Each structure stands twice: as structure tokens, then as C-alpha cells.
Amino acid sequence: MSETITGTTTEEPTATAPNEFTQAELGWEAWLEPLPLEELTERHYAGLVDKGRANSPYFRLLVRDPDILGARTRTDNDIFYNEKGGLTRALRELSATAASRTNGCIFCASVHSRFASHHSKRPEDVQRLLDDGTAAQQGDPQWRAVIDASVALTRIPDEFGASDVRALREAGLDDVAIIDAINGAAFFNWANRLMLSLGEPTPPKS
């Protein structure tokens, strides 16, 4: 069943959407129509930043406003890929995973948990976070501090404060690393809500 709103067809969620957190490579289906590949212009590709993102229905939906998508993607890239200092890539991905696990974004959690596993070489610890939740035991104090800070920022942003920053510092993070942890969780507080409102995950391709 579908309905048309202002000329755009929206689809009801499918019954096969994944309903548990996983590190598997999921698909994603938009409820609004992504821009067809053949209609992408040079301006759209500039907004995508990475041309490979044209293969994603999520980014082809967002690229309907290429200027905003371009700003969003450059922000994303700087938060997660700029390793000139601060937090390790593994812990940046962990902050995104913890925020996505808290928000219930199965797709984002799957993507960033895979990155966290790859960069940390600790897939069992990442899977424990997915299976048992953000309160699951983590022996590494930096992992514990980054997860807790990400959860606090996600649940009630206005209540994130000095005690959360102090816990990150006591775990051995300097000011730049603390900013990276906050940025990773804050970005995915926004990104999760956008993705959850525009579509749904689909099962891995067989």
C-alpha cells in the first residue's frame, strides 16, 4: 500500500526490515524517491563529494539539495577521517555506534560498528555493545568513557556537562580527543534522526 503526497510516492515500511542490531552489511530503502542516477549533474556530484556515494539511495535522496549535502559530507569526513590529532579512528566510530545504538538506528549502527571492529580489531567487544546495549561491560576505560559520554549526549543533550567531560579526561583523553568524541556522537544524533525519518534498513543481500 502506498500514498502520494505532493506528487511523491511514499511506501509503507516492509515487513522484512531487520529488527536487531548487527554488524552485517545492510541495505537501505527510501520512503521518498531518490534522484535517479541518470539525472545526476556535475553540481549533484559536487554535493556528493565522493562519486561512489551515488550508488546509495540515501545520498541520492539527500543530493536533491546538493549544497546542503556537500556541507554535511565535508563535516562528516572531517569528524571521522581527519586523524591529524585527537581520538583514534576506532574510538570515533565507537562514539557513532553508541549513539546509533541508543537512538535505535539499526542501519547506522551496522555501518559504524563494522568500522569500529575493523579499526580496533575487537569485533567481540563491539558486538557485545550491539547485543547487550551500551551498558554492557567493557574492560577498556577509554571505551567505557566514550560510550558513556556518547549515550549521555544522545539521551538528553542539555544535561551533558562537566562530569561527562571529566570522565573522558580521567580515561586519558586530551582536549582534542574529547572534542572528537563529542563530535562523533553529536553528528550521529542528527544523522540517525534523518535516516530514521526517511527510510528503513533492508536485509543483507544473499
Image (spheres, grey):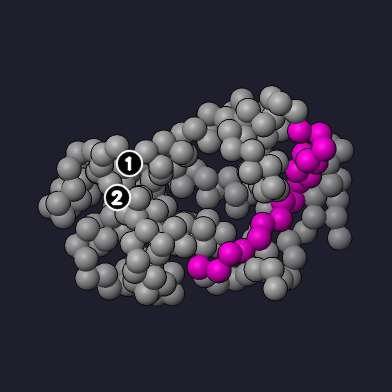
Q: In this view, does 52 lie to the left or right of 79?
A: right
Whether residue 19 is visible, yes or no, is yes
Where does the image place residue 15, in percent across and percent down from the top left? Answer: 73, 70
Q: Number of marks in the image?
A: 2
The residue to which callout 1 is attached is 83
Which corner quadrant of the image does residue 47 belong to? top right
- Residues 192 and 72: in front is 72
Q: Which residue is drawn at 75% across and 43% down?
A: 34
> Which three-letter amino acid code belongs to the residue tagged 2?
Thr
- Residues 13 and 204: in front is 204
> Which three-letter amino acid code belongs to the residue tagged 1?
Glu
- In the image, is residue 63 above or below residue 151? above
For the residues bearing labels 2 and 1, Cβ distance under 8 angstroms: yes
Quarter of the N terminus within the rendering: bottom right
Where does the image place residue 185, in percent across and percent down from the top left? Answer: 39, 48
- Residue 44, magenta (yes or no): no
The label shown at residue 40 is none
Whether residue 129 is visible, yes or no, is no
Where does the image place residue 43, in percent across and percent down from the top left? Answer: 69, 24
Secondary structure character of the magenta stretch overall? loop
**Mark 1 residue crowding within 10 angstroms, few (<14) / some (14–19) / many (20+):** few
The residue to which callout 2 is attached is 88
In 3D space, how far apart are the residues under numbered discs 2 and 1 (Cα atoms)? 7 Å
Span colored in magenta: 23-40
Q: Is residue 22 left or right of residue 183?
A: right
Where does the image place residue 137, in percent across and percent down from the top left? Answer: 27, 73
- Residues 153 and 73: in front is 73
Quarter of the C terminus within the rendering: bottom right
Q: In this view, does 62 lie to the left or right of 106?
A: right
Q: Considering only order in the chain, which callout, 1 or 2, is on the residue closer to the N terminus?
A: 1
